[in-house]
Image (spheres, rainbow, N blue to C red):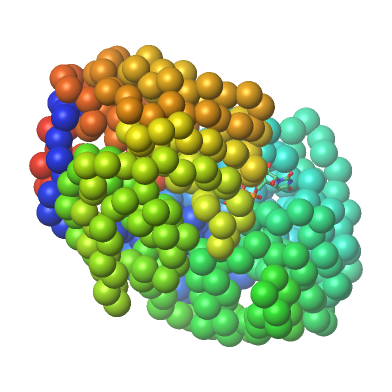
Amino acid sequence: MKKLEVFGATRLKGQIKISGSKNASLPILAATLLSNKKISLANLPRVKDIETMLLLLKSLGSIIEKNKKITTIKNNKQVKTFASYGLVKTMRAGILVLGPLLAKFGKAKVSLPGGCAIGTRPINIHLKALSKLGVKFKIIQGYVHANAPKGLIGANIRFPKISVGATENLIIASCLAKGKTVLSNCAIEPEIKDLVNFLNKMGCKVKWISKRTIKIIGKAKPNALSYQVMPDRIEAGTYLIAAALTEGKLKILGIDPQIINTEIKVLKKIGAKIIIKKKEIIIEGNKKIKNINIKTSPYPGFPTDLQAQMMVLLCKANKKSYIKEEIFENRFMHVSELNRMGAKIFTSGNKAIIEGNIKFQAAELMATDLRASVSLILAALASKGKSVINRIYHLDRGYEDIEKKLKKVGAKIKRVN
Ligand code: EPZ
């Protein structure tokens, strides 16, 4: 089992180029199922979840070719409509093939994603909304058996709760439905905007008609296209937090600062010096880190995917801070590991109280989920001595070349067996 050794403490200095967004790439890859034409995608991050999604598309019959920079996908006429548990269980975003398969073939058998460390990850909102497009489904032995005998028929649908995945599944499915669909109370993460740009470039007709309402005209005729996926704002936020934590100075390249405005405001409030330019952010950490209270919420609020990383930073604040995790029911798995490094974090339900002025101690650690793993690396960078992080397969799902990028800015980090 691979693990990471990190020798701290290190002040990170230099520049980091942000890779393509995992969470924009996954729905875009699922949406390629709508088309039989050749689709070329650039800037897909080389991470495990993308590999898994490509395997899933291959298992459905897509022909995939890739070189260092471009991945091309070509669906021939006959595509299977069965997404296996083996592929979907490790990457819950596999459920995103349900919408396009139903739209194109009127049927699909897709494994229920199952839960993960951060929560039960239900898909009731996806299924209820798809049923409003005329889908009938049954859950049999852990699979969704879905059918739309008359094809998908456009409808007006209001999501009962903001859901990134359900919004994506329904936008994609509605592109081939008969007639018009209006979706309201949508998630509006930048990754969804990227998906909409991709769909429109492919020849679909998707238009935002208000902040959280989108209109899709169905029966699109998808054409061939080349598309470059947006950069990863969570990766960018992670490295910004790393600079603030280690009192370092980093130039983050290749990201539009606008899409991480909330995070930049928070980091300025805790005392980091930040200069923003068109496609780069320069951050300098301050010795004194001011405490702050954070509540995670759907975009444009503070992202749940940066909650664990922020918690590490707040351990170094001058006073106590509070974090409320409003999106997932069990996203504090990193707390016990951080407390083993000398942190004093107390949790009750979805609230965490973080004592400040902590001196992290290096330790042997266990990663539990993607964002928790990277929070352990951050804490290790701020600790004197050698930390060892186990189960780093969680990390490899979503951070491209993380050791290489951190080494380049001064971190002493290596992967060992
Ligand atoms: C997406 O997950 C992201 N994953 C997550 O990133 C991210 O944390 C999350 O959105 C919130 O921003 C991808 O984009 C691949 P949701 P998703 O549907 O779509 C509940 C990472 O680290 N819910 O917005 O699964 C759900 O349980 C990952 O990159 C239902 O109850 O998130 C959660 O509590 C982790 N029923 C809340 O809604 C449903 O049918 C938000 O989930 C769907 C969701």
Q: Residue at x 70, y 70 (%)?
A: 212
Depicted 361 relative to depicted 236: above or below: above
Can residue 394 be seen from the camera position used here?
A: no
Residue 275 location, quadrant = bottom left
Where does residue 177 sit, x and y in percent of width and height?
77, 74
Where does residue 264 sit, x and y in percent of width and height?
39, 59
Where does residue 136 sit, x and y in percent of width and height?
88, 54
Taking the image as shown, residue 204 lies to the left or right of residue 343, namely right
Q: Which residue occupies the foreground of this view, 234 or 138?
A: 234
Q: Residue at x 86, y 73 (%)?
A: 155
Quadrant for the C terminus in the image: top left
Where does residue 198 sit, x and y in percent of width and height?
51, 75
Can residue 121 be seen from the camera position used here?
A: yes
Taking the image as shown, residue 175 lies to the left or right of residue 226, namely right
Taking the image as shown, residue 218 lies to the left or right of residue 138, namely left
Q: Which residue occupies the foreground of this view, 7 or 117?
A: 7
Taking the image as shown, residue 49 lies to the left or right of residue 216, namely left
Q: Residue at x 16, y 57 (%)?
A: 15
Depicted 69 relative to depicted 122: above or below: below
Q: Residue at x 22, y 25 (%)?
A: 383
Residue 351 location, quadrant = top right
Quadrant for the N terminus in the image: top left
Number of marks in the image? 0
